[in-house]
Amino acid sequence: MKLILVALGLCSVVLSSKVRFDDFKVHRVTPTTASQVEALRELEENQIAYNFWSSAVDVHHPVDIMVPPHLIYDFQDFLDFQQLTSEVFIDNVQDRIDNEKPSVQSRVFGWNDYYRLSDIYDWMRTIATAYEVATLVVGGTSYQDRPIMGLRISYSAININRTVFVEGGIHAHEWISPAVSTFIIQQLLTSSDPVVRRVAQSYDWYFFPVFNPDGYEYSHTTNRMWRKTRTPYGSCYGADPNRNWGYRWNTGGGSTNPCSDTFSGPNPFSERSVSTMSQFLTGISSRLVGYISFHSYSQLLLYPYGYTSANRDNWGELLEVGEKAATALASRFGTRFNVGNIGATLGVFAGGSIDWVKGTYGTRVTYTYKLRDLGRYGFILPADHIVPTGLETLDSFVTIFDEFGAKL
Ligand SMILES: *[C@@H]1O[C@H](CO)[C@@H](O)[C@H](O)[C@H]1NC(C)=O
Ligand SMILES: [Zn+2]
């Protein structure tokens, strides 16, 4: 009997190929000295077995680090040596993963669960069939030959020169991002709220909910924490598609190590998803007035650039409208977002999509969201947060485009 159980156990290990995160903990560490900041940066760069959920920016900025169980004593040594203390924000990452999805799963697409790529694409096809104003577009292709599908929503040809591009899911494990993207599509098409209707009908929209389809699928099938593309680089896989764009590429905040989660790629636009989508964007660039990207987590609404912490271009109006958007967002459930410059808030990094769009085409309305939460769940936000996150994000989203509407 024992032998059979052992055999079954081995068998299930072989069959279930999902990476597990049992007893992986997420520690929040807040450096108070410059040398502690530097030590945390070095740890992130040199010890990729630690998974930094957020990077060291400056003193008093918290850093979230996922620590695997085999490194628990090494990590404690590091903290002791640096005279740092930590707070355990997530005690067992696998528990969070196991409780992320509802216990009863619906096959019908909606916003009470996270869905696979084919479900999202099927839903987009259904929308394109059901609504005359919605058209399916293929914007690009991934390394593994998946189409990068988008929906264009166009109520009137008059809006052609007021085109807005919405990017979801460039980081594979930020599942709330595609979910909020599809939620907003649905609301722009069906809401009877007068502000939502006005905004929906005043722009020409392109929504791409899953910018990184290979990574997204891999995060469902194999590794819930997968962030990058799936292009092979030696013994490691993937580049960070938000470090790979060809504007001041690799001038900071990305890694040259293919095994790192922030690998910038061997050269700009090395990632097929990034290069093909950049060509698509170039094609609509003369009509483009807005670019929004959805990431998680930490409740921030950010304006360019990432490559510098200095304020540039039309940052003044982006800050002003951003504050109004954050107020609108908070008015629904009290969720607080901070507004700021990407580089100053997250730490300087080059090669982000929004930097390329802003720097190359001077697109006016450019924001990056970091959606819920503040770290209790981090990237593994339970599915029952999708609807409230979608509603509050929509409130801020329509505020942005209503505010700019009169100016454009
Ligand atoms: C859009 O802009 C182009 C180029 O400036 C112009 O020729 C065209 O008439 C504009 N279309 C609309 C509908 O405003
Ligand atoms: Zn992200």
Image: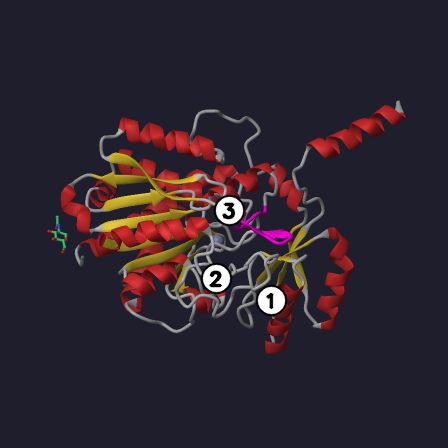
Q: What residue is at 43 percent from the left and 68 percent from the top?
A: 307
Label 1: element kind: loop
Q: Which residues are magenta?
A: 225-237
Residue 117's place in the image compared with 58, above or below, is above
Q: Position of residue 124 (x, y in %)?
A: 36, 33
In the displayed structure, would residue 376 be above or below residue 147?
Answer: below
Q: Which residue is mark 2?
A: 267
User: Where does residue 306 sit, x and y in percent of width and height?
Assistant: 42, 65
Q: Measuring from the top left, give residue 213's x and y in whole percent.
A: 47, 42
In this picture, residue 239 sits left or right of residue 93: left
Callout 1 crowding tier (Cα within 10 Å): few <14, some 14–19, many ≥20 = many
Cβ of mark 1 under 8 A from ligand 2: no
Tag 1–tag 2 contact (CB < 8 Å) = no
Q: Is residue 229 magenta?
A: yes
Query: Looking at the image, is 97 positioned above or below residue 107?
Result: below
Choose top left, top right, bottom left or bottom right for residue 14: top right
Which of these two is toward me, 184 or 292?
292
- Assess disc 2: are there few (<14), some (14-19) or many (≥20) residues with their C-alpha within 10 Å of its C-alpha: few
- Which residue lies most toward the front here? 234
Q: Which residue is mark 3?
A: 172
For label 3, the SS is: loop
**Mark 3, other Cα within 10 Å: few <14 / some 14–19 / many ≥20:** many
Query: Left or right of 5: which side holds 163?
Result: left
Residue 59 within the segment the image draws in magenta: no
The circle on residue 3 is none
- Residue 343: x and y in percent read 44, 67
Point 56% across, 72% down: residue: 59
C-alpha gap between disc 1 and disc 2: 33 Å
